[in-house]
Image: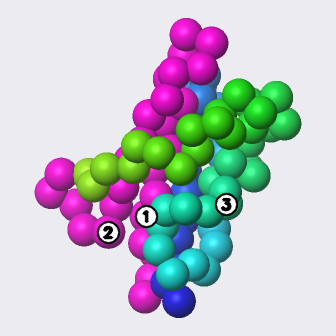
Amino acid sequence: MPLYTYVAVYKDSSYIAQKRRSNYQGFSDWIEALPAGLQKKAAPSMYAGFEPVPNRKNVWRRTQTIDDSELVVIAIQTDS
């Protein structure tokens, strides 16, 4: 199974998680790296919105607004 690296950025802080999965989407791996309060706010839509990053291979991005700030999550297939 490929290794995926998830980088989440929110209010000038970054959070990193890595897991081996069959695909980058449909798992809560990235949200588990967030502080508990932010996890709770991000959870209702944690599986939605991943889109391929243009001109990049095996990189996906999603954004979500929480408390008037943007949470950006980037999923990268780190190896195969």
Q: In what quadrant of the picture does the C terminus appear?
A: bottom left
Q: Is residue 21 above or below residue 24?
A: below
Tell me the residue at 45%/50% (across/down).
74
Check disc 2 and report the residue beneath it.
58
Q: Look at the image and give the residue range highlighted in magenta.
A: 54-80
Q: Main secondary structure of the magenta part?
A: strand
Q: Quadrant of residue 41?
A: top right
Amino acid type of the residue tagged 3 in the rendering = Asp
For this orientation, the residue located farthest to the left is 55
| Circle 1/circle 2 CB separation < 8 Å | yes
Check disc 3 and report the residue beneath it.
29
- Mark yes or no: residue 16 visible: no
Q: Residue 73 or 46: which is nearer the viewer?
A: 46
Amino acid type of the residue tagged 2 in the rendering = Asn
Judged from the image, the secondary structure of the residue bearing numbered disc 2 is loop
**Circle 2 residues within 10 Å: few <14, some 14–19, many ≥20:** some
User: N-terminal of the two: label 2 or label 3?
Assistant: 3
Residue 76: mark: 1
Tell me the residue at 55%/10% (across/down).
68
- Mark yes or no: residue 5 visible: yes
Judged from the image, the secondary structure of the residue bearing numbered disc 1 is strand
Q: Is residue 68 above or below residue 35?
A: above
For this orientation, the residue located farthest to the top is 68
Percent position of residue 28, x then y? 67, 57
For this orientation, the residue located farthest to the front is 44
